[in-house]
Amino acid sequence: MKFVVVTGGVISGLGKGITTSSLARLFKARGIAVTAVKIDPYLNVDAGTMNPYQHGEVFVLDDGTEVDLDLGNYERFLGQSLPGSHNITTGKVYRSVIEKERRGDYLGNTVQIIPHVTGEVKRMIREAAKAAGAELTLIEVGGTVGDIESMPFLEALREMQQEVGGRENMAFVHTTLVPVVGPVGELKTKPTQHSVRELRSIGIQPDMIVARGSLPLTPDIKAKISLFCDVPLEAIISVPDQPCVYDVPLLFEAQGVGEYIVRRLGLPSHAADWTRWKEFTARYRQGDQEINIGVVGKYVELKDAYLSHIESFHHCQGHLGVNLNLHWFDSEELAPNSPAIQRLLKMQAILVPGGYGVRGVEGKIRAIGIARERKIPFLGVCLGFQLATCEVARDLAGLTDANSTEFDSETPHPVVTLLDSQVGAHGLGGTQRLGSQKVLLAENSRIRELYGRADIWERHRHRYEVNPKYLPQLAERGYRVTGTSPSGLVEAFELEGHPYFVGVQFHPEFLSRPETPHPLYLGLVKAALSHQEADVTVPASSPPAIA
Ligand code: GLN
């Protein structure tokens, strides 16, 4: 079992997740069984309770674990699903150590960070790697070297390097920033030097340095970093900002990273196959047709809150060879006749993603109403699906003030609600429906045609459900239930007589991959291509967020 550890220095937000995912892909391209683990040095046990404003989207795995968004990057780059054990947080480690202590597992010993917490970290990493059957495991350490929070993890990894047989079996890749300063745009290596010194002070010598920044490294700068940091010149890798994250593995490959690590770790060396990946990135760039897609949410200032949706559109772009411009709409600004509404009318497709809490809900319902009336292709995901149900109920079925009981517990028409079966013994809200669950698709439906099959598995993360009591009334107005759970819960609907008006209770964005874009996003984009009313001259409000 071999390991590559990815650490970060200087500042956070350097794209360690993309670095880790891209490195992992180098080995997958060589037919090596590879997996990836993310260490998050925060005390939360999982990301489930975290505000998307702070950490970006909460990603959900097949097994229902709510994890850091980097796991989404790993899954997309590797084209493989990962279990919850691949996200190790300080909270999980401490919880396990304290449970063991209470059970008396430590036999009266004083329980300490070293060796007990570090021991637990090593155990969790080993078990994840073993269960995955991986020849090589990538381990990304969140945070920046020098943070108090990440110290126990780095210490555990330092110890582990010795235990697995040294540097032949565990390599450290350090990601740093090489900023450009001054009027002539000089590249500065000092932050990298300091950060490597910090890493060495805790006993870790990097085997490779990935230099991030706005400009590529010049040969003299590479030589300088190599000299000061004791890392061979061929292992100083330049990764300037890329317009498309899926170019990063190819950038690594072009600099010999795959071959270098394979040699260092004595991994089996097969020729790398990039055929499909290169086709994807070439098509991603080639598009000359512009398509304007409106995304209506409430966390729009932080695009990472919608990362998987953004990536799902990127996958469509690389598949269809069209340019997708995402326009962000803050749902609170969508007041009647507002400038934001005027802009929304010009969109060729509208996505309303998931969310929690009442803020901005009425604006989302207004956006959905526009998509329905103007026949703009629409996809509603989770909360977007629930609100589309409310919109149809209010405007088409005449159920005034229909709502989800999440937002109005007194609504006369609770078309979205907690079902009796969900309400627990204390009368409190049921727990969330999480993870991959089976969905049965109706015959002769658009959704079944898009998937090309009768049953599918999709990931869930929600609490409220469509109220079956209202289905007959909604059906009369063209609301057709086209997906159900095996127990009969509403999973998907389509509106009859609309070119593309699809709502799904589950989260398709978590399953889209560059090589296999998700059918529901492809369906939306294809419908957008033929949307007539569009005024394609609208400038993008902001470019798609690609680090
Ligand atoms: N707030 C809604 C619910 O709990 C939708 C959740 C979501 O969009 N992920 O059911």
Image (cartoon, rainbow, N blue to C red):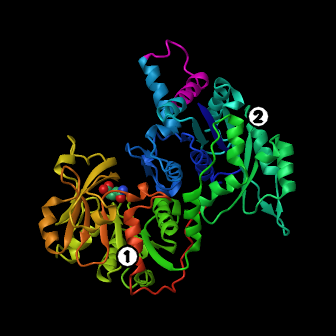
Residue 9 visible within the image: no
**432 over 340 or under it: above or below:** above
Identify the residue position indicated by label 1 in the image: 527
Q: Is residue 111 magenta?
A: yes
**140 over 112 or under it: above or below:** below
Residue 287 visible within the image: yes
The reply, left or right, for residue 222 in relation to residue 99 is right
Expressed as whole percent of the image width and height from the top left, the position of residue 83 reads 44, 40
Residue at 80% of width from left, 42% of height from top?
231
Between 237 and 184, the one nearer to me in the picture: 237
Expressed as whole percent of the image width and height from the top left, the position of residue 65 reads 41, 43
Work out how far the residue at label 2 is from the one at label 1, CA to CA, in angstroms. Answer: 57 Å
Q: Amino acid at mark 2?
A: Ser
Residue at 21% of width from left, 50% of height from top?
486
Mark 2 Cα shell of 10 Å, populated few (<14), some (14-19), many (≥20): few
The reply, left or right, for residue 513 in relation to residue 431 is right
Expressed as whole percent of the image width and height from the top left, the position of residue 58 reads 45, 52
Identify the residue position indicated by label 2 in the image: 201
Secondary structure, mark 1, is helix
